């Protein structure tokens, strides 16, 4: 998917995260988290898997995590990407 505009998904409430996405020439993911030392690798893994499933190859993602579970991370990243790509047709099989 091609990122064509800026978009947001999520909140900065406890157990949630805020995903900010914007167009860029390459793929850059910045993760800020209260639990980065304990779960940083897992958060990065879920984000990378989700972006790969959606075929995102470029864009700037800034993630402000407040202890979100994997399913929440996946849902917020998917929502932000779909909004930023202005997706009109969604391949539901790539989302889980």
Image (cartoon, helix red, strand yellow):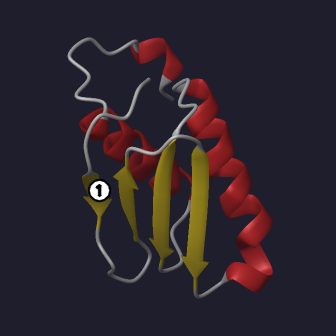
x 54%, y 77%: residue: 67
Q: Residue furthest bottom?
A: 34
Compared with 75, 87 (above or below) is above
Number of dots carrying numbers = 1
26 to the left or right of 3: right
Compared with 49, 54 (above or below) is above
Q: Residue 25: horizontal and vertical position, in percent?
A: 52, 40
Which residue is identified by label 1?
9
Q: Residue 60: horizontal and vertical position, in percent?
A: 48, 53
Q: Residue 4: horizontal and vertical position, in percent?
A: 29, 34
Q: Residue 31: horizontal and vertical position, in percent?
A: 59, 70
- 76 or 86: which is nearer to us? 86
- 36 or 25: which is nearer to us? 25
72 to the left or right of 32: left
SS assignment at label 1: strand
x 33%, y 42%: residue: 79
x 59%, y 26%: residue: 53
Mark 1 packing: few (<14 Cα in 10 Å), some, or many (20+)? some
Image quarter where the N terminus lies is top left
Compared with 63, 32 (above or below) is below
55 to the left or right of 79: right
x 40%, y 16%: residue: 92
The image quadrant that residue 19 belongs to is bottom left
């Amino acid at each position: 998917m091609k990122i064509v505009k800026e978009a947001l998904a999520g909140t900065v409430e406890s157990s949630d995260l805020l995903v900010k996405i914007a167009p860029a020439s390459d793929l850059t993911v910045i993760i800020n988290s209260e639990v980065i030392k304990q779960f940083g690798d897992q958060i990065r893994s879920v984000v990378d898997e989700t972006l790969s499933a959606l075929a995102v190859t470029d864009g700037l993602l800034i993630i402000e995590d407040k202890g979100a579970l994997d399913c929440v991370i996946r849902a917020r990243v998917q929502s932000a990407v779909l909004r930023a790509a202005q997706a009109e047709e969604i391949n539901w099989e790539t989302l889980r």
